[in-house]
Amino acid sequence: MGTTPMARLAERVTGALNALVALVLLMAFVPLLLVVACLVRFSSPGPILFRQQRIGRFGVPFTIYKFRTMKVGAEQELQDLVRAQGGTVGAYMKVDGDPRITRIGAFLRATSLDELPQLLNVVKRDMNLVGPRPQIPDEVVTYHHLHWRRLLVPPGITGLWQVSGRSDLSAQQALELDDIYVKQRSAFFDTRLLFRTVWVVLARRGAY
């Protein structure tokens, strides 16, 4: 994938179009972004944006942006919360009824508004609008050799995993869907996934 001159040109054009669309969306969403930023800022102490290292195309790390949905120091609290539930910390760990999530944060997650700052990542060409889930380094090191294929394309704000269950999926199911996406990737497929994402977000399916 992306080895011929035409394929490389197509990738550059796709990336440029994604960045242009993301920039237009950012400008259109300025009022909404300001409102959400104020809600996050005044709902709990801490920064407005959450920053975390993720792994992008070809294994290149980048900083992802989201609206902060948890209390400051949430990552340090994870081990205690997991141990209290009788488990151990793992790369794909989720905590039931996570008390670290703020009230505003729960709303932002349910509506996917917390992901809007990722449009900045698309403008910076770290991500595309559609693609595999951008994962943290600890998740990537657990990959089976077949999972590395997902790093051949840029990660996305949405993707096949987003419209197929999101948080309702197991880690293995999400990886399998990402692999299917890479195999079937096309401009038409991406467009279909974008339209399906709108419906999934409005219905709040698998968002928590």
Image (spheres, rainbow, N blue to C red):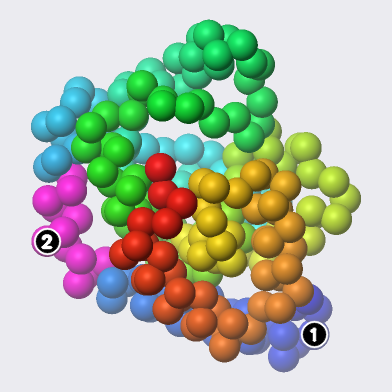
Dot 2: what SS?
helix
Q: Which residues are magenta?
A: 26-37
Which quadrant of the figure contains the C terminus? top left
Q: Residue at x 66, y 16 (%)?
A: 88
- Nearer the N terminus, badge 1 or badge 2? 1
Residue 4, numbered label: 1
As rendered, which of 160 and 46 lies closer to the eye? 160
Apparent side of residue 23 relative to residue 125 in the rendered image (left or right): left
Residue type, label 1: Thr
8 sits to left or right of 20:
right
**Disc 1, SS:** loop
Main SS, magenta residues: helix
- Residue 162 sits inside the magenta stretch: no
Q: Amino acid at mark 2?
A: Pro
Mark in front: 1 vs 2: 2
Whole-percent x, y for residue 134 in the image: 57, 51
- Who's the residue at 69% across and 52% down the image? 173
Residue tagged 2: 31
Q: Looking at the rendered structure, which numbered label has been put on residue 72?
A: none
